Amino acid sequence: MSAQIRFQNLLLQNPDSNIIYVGLDNKIKITGIKSFSNAKLVAVGMIISSPKNGTFILRATTTGISSLTLYDGSRLVATKQYNVNRIPEPIVGLGAFRDTTLSISQIMENRKLVSIIPNCIALLKYPVVKFSNTIVSQKDTLYSDFRSSGDSLSEGLIKIISNLKTGDKIIFESIQVQGPDDARIAPFYIILK
């Protein structure tokens, strides 16, 4: 083994960051080693696979600070400290907007619900798979139970939205995303301006 050992988490946007996420397969690539035949990676609170092509799969079970320790047989080779975090709950908005006040034209230009994971640098996508809507107009007219399969506003909903007025409210609820766990997505609303 050589002296220039590098640990990278390939699950992250910046692989050199010292973050590991609980419940995900963190792919730790180790470079600077000639042979992995006697290599062993050890960390408290993690399940670690045997290396394949210099990459270990780590599944953390608890949050906190943990050190990854690399051994060649019984000889300590390198250690790197990581912050072990939970994935924050995704939040959903309409298109690129996270505002609660939009115009009809902004809604028509952004007909898809998009999820983001705040304060998370993991390369994850949680696509919206279904949601429902309720519309409350200033005239106290209630349109409810618009169900959409997928991430886009339905044509029926778009027709109703195009006739709404300033101050009317569109509520997005029962939002489901596809991800590694069952995330509960908070409802959100848009008031027309």
Image (tube, grey):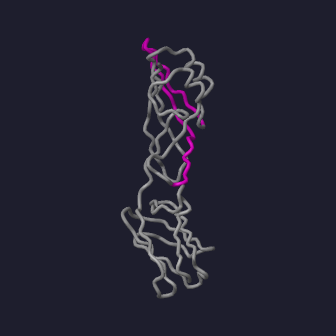
Name the quadrant of the N terminus.
bottom right
User: Outermost residue, top direction?
Assistant: 139
Q: Is residue 30 above or below residue 177?
A: below
Image quarter of residue 149: top right
* Residue 11 in picture, x, y percent from top left: 54, 59
* Residue 107 in picture, x, y percent from top left: 55, 25
* Magenta segment: 122-149
User: Outermost residue, bottom direction?
Assistant: 74
Q: In this orientation, which residue lies closer to the viewer: 128 or 95?
A: 95
User: Outermost residue, front direction?
Assistant: 4
Q: How many marks?
A: 0
Q: Which residue shows up at 55% across the image and 34% down it?
A: 95
Image quarter of residue 159: top right
Q: Is residue 56 magenta?
A: no
Q: Which residue shows up at 45% across the image and 65% down it?
A: 60
What secondary structure is the magenta-colored segment mainly? strand
Q: Left or right: where does residue 86 sit relative to residue 177?
A: left
User: Outermost residue, left direction?
Assistant: 64
* Residue 96 in picture, x, y percent from top left: 54, 35
Q: Is residue 139 magenta?
A: yes
Q: In this orientation, which residue lies closer to the viewer: 1 or 89?
A: 1
Image quarter of residue 57: bottom right
Q: Which residue shows up at 55% across the image and 53% down it?
A: 123
Q: Is residue 42 above or below residue 135?
A: below
Q: In this orientation, which residue lies closer to the viewer: 185 or 141?
A: 185
Q: Which residue shows up at 52% across the image and 15% down it?
A: 164
* Residue 68 in picture, x, y percent from top left: 45, 73
